[in-house]
Amino acid sequence: MRSGLSIDHIFPIRNDASARLMRLKADCLLQAGVIDAEERVAVYASAGAVLGFAETAAIPASALRRTEAREAALVH
């Protein structure tokens, strides 16, 4: 996480219900530009471990383009 907080603190995953909720939270925060695509993938991987399956966390191309554009704007 950019602010120095760990993903475990921002996305507490304890059971099936919290795993599903944290995946939704990650999707919303990605769309809002709060987290990047790599952080979303990490949340999906943690949730997948709790849910008992490997999650590939396919990221829509539009979300990746917005993330790349936002990061490019920060550099310039």
Image: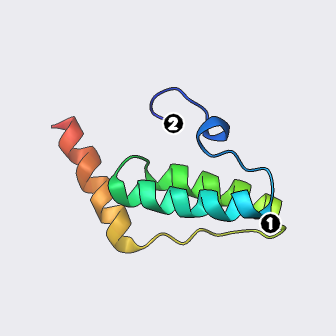
| Colour pattern | rainbow
- In the image, what residue occupies the spot 69% across and 69% down? 55
- In the image, what residue occupies the spot 62% across and 46% down? 11
**x%, y% of residue 45?**
69, 58
Pointer 1: residues within 10 angstroms few (<14), some, or many (20+)? Answer: some
In the rendered structure, the answer to whether residue 59 lies left or right of residue 68 reads right
**x%, y% of residue 12?**
69, 45
- In the image, what residue occupies the spot 81% across and 59% down? 50
Please, is residue 7 above or below residue 52 in the view?
A: above
Disc 2 versus disc 1: distance between alpha carbons? 23 Å
**x%, y% of residue 3?**
46, 28
| Residues tagged 2 and 1 counted as in contact (Cβ below 8 A) | no
Q: Quadrant of residue 62?
A: bottom left
Please, is residue 1 above or below residue 59 in the view?
A: above
Of residues 3 and 12, the one drawn nearer to the viewer in this rendering: 12
Q: Which residue is mark 1?
A: 51
Query: Callout 2, which amino acid?
Result: Met
Determine the secondary structure under disc 1: helix
In the rendered structure, the answer to whether residue 31 lies left or right of residue 45 reads left
In the rendered structure, the answer to whether residue 7 lies left or right of residue 68 reads right
Q: Earlier in the sequence, mark 2 or mark 1?
A: 2
In the rendered structure, the answer to whether residue 36 lies left or right of residue 72 reads right
Instruction: Point out the residue furthest to the top here.
Output: 4
Instruction: Point out the residue furthest to the front here.
Output: 17
**x%, y% of residue 35?**
43, 47
Q: Quadrant of residue 7?
A: top right
Q: Which mark is residue 43?
A: none
Q: Quadrant of residue 8?
A: top right
Q: Which residue is mark 2?
A: 1
Q: Quadrant of the C terminus?
A: top left
